[in-house]
Image: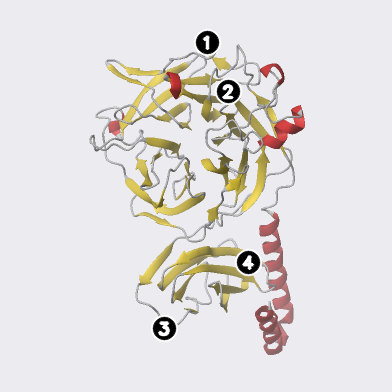
Amino acid sequence: MVIVNVTISNMLNKHEVNMKKIYIVLVLSFLLTSSFLTAQTFDGEWECKYSTIDDQPNSTGYNTISVAVTKENSFVAVVIRSSNSTYYLVGYNNADSTSGRAGVYPYAPAGLQTLWINGFDQVYLREALDIASFGNLVFVANNDPSHNILAFELKDDSLYTHPYRMVTATNPFSPDSLWAIDVDDNGRVYVTTQGTATEPSKIFIYESPTVESAWEGSHDVAPLQTIVLPDNGTSRGVTANSDGSVIYASNYDNGKIYAYVGNTTDGYTLSPSFNFQRIDEVDSIRTAAPWGLKFMDGKNILLAAMDASYTTSAYSYGRIYAINPNTGEILDTLDQAKWNFDKTGAYNNRPGGTLGNVSGYTSTYNVDVDENDNVYSQSFYGWTVEKWTFNGTLPSIELTITSIEKLDSQIPNSFEVSQNYPNPFNPSTTIEFSVTQLAPITLSIYNVNGELVTKLVNGVEFQSGSYKVTFDASKLASGTYIYSLNNGLNTISKKMTLIK
């Protein structure tokens, strides 16, 4: 703040003849930044529009682990009960709490398995944990011996096999089991492997079936890219924005969500501006961490399902966090457990299994959205799918997440940040900085009123070395801005000028 005040004072002393112009620039910058901050405010509450009843004729019928939305009120749920080899899909069209199920399903059907069949080519659903949609198609991360990605099509009367199939087990002696899956607007498929306490998960990115013929032919082609997550643990969620330029993946073991920036041609780099790590305490022995993820493209909001792992003792917790996609900051909470308690007076109650807007047994493992920004979740132990609406105006957030390039691994002589170049600039500029030892680095942008515009790096630990990052100010008004580098102990600030 002192730096900002001195800067303004010097500007006015040296350029008093331009006070009116400076005042206008300051007002524009203030209004834009105020608009930026206000745009991240959630001004309403989440409400459960409906929850499919846990009864005929509209129940999923068993433990429901994931849901993929094809359009508003139409979706496909994944049902899994490993103890009796039950793995199947249930489709819904124009659903509400009591209607919409496409097809006839028994209740608690032990041993029922969905069959993907294309002529003589047959694959049974096996240990499928996640599903994603692309139009009316849904893609399932399956764990048959070849660990296929299987495609199905939701039609008016039922769910049908689609010829698309892709083998992911490229090493038959050490195949990777799959967990999470997503599909971007171009049809590219993102799937995570099941890491362990001693091995990190990976993200496989496959070309769209509309481009890659192997989905209908050999069913076997190498991924466009493979991303190895930086820490050991299981990635139970993956999502990409509409064009696949930003990918998010969760790690249940350490509570982190990672953000990668790039493309399938040049590859992806871990973004230092995004920093999310959270393990919530459910009770004295249980914790909750991020499961499934979904990027709400219409608003640029990252949604993360949070819950404890496969336990009936966490009904008081389940929730979905709405997260800033640039920084990892939690902006709002869809608290399903609280909703259940407020409606029924208990965390484990759904009168008759048929109360229309409450699951009663919060076990939130996945999340999806429709074209109108409604949110869908599931209750693993409530055997339901839920639709949630926001009774206010959802904020829209500019997607400004950045990648960073390491210039030199040699230990610099000092902690410093260089003058940005070019300067003045329009619309982007480069900022270089040096780190002398491992430290949590934050690189922030402020307007001349000292108000935060964005964080290019958000508390991420950097090894010693020199780095550079590009700042895109295309959405900002002309004026003077302050960039500030902090390593946890010291802060260095400099001015830069945007001229449009």
Determine which of the numbered discs, if any, sits on residue 487 in the image: none
Q: CA distance from mark 4 to mark 1?
A: 60 Å
Labelled pair 2, 1 in contact (Cβ < 8 Å):
no
Residue underneath mark 1: 106
Residue underneath mark 3: 413
Q: CA distance from mark 4 to mark 3?
A: 36 Å
Q: Nearer the viewer, mark 4 or mark 1?
A: 1
Q: CA distance from mark 3 to mark 2?
A: 60 Å
Closer to the chain start, of discs 2 and 1, is 1
Question: Which quarter shows the N terminus?
Answer: bottom right
Q: How many marks?
A: 4
Which residue type carries mark 2?
A: Trp
Label 1 crowd (10 A; few <14 / some 14-19 / many >=20): few
Which residue type carries mark 4?
A: Ala
Closer to the chain start, of discs 3 and 2, is 2
Secondary structure under the numbered disc 3 in the rendered image: loop
Q: CA distance from mark 2 to mark 4?
A: 50 Å
Determine which of the numbered discs, if any, sits on residue 477 in the image: 4
Does the rendering let one see residue 297? no
Q: Quadrant of residue 344?
A: top right
Closer to the chain start, of discs 4 and 3, is 3
Q: Is residue 67 left or right of residue 87?
A: right
Label 3 crowd (10 A; few <14 / some 14-19 / many >=20): few
Residue underneath mark 2: 383
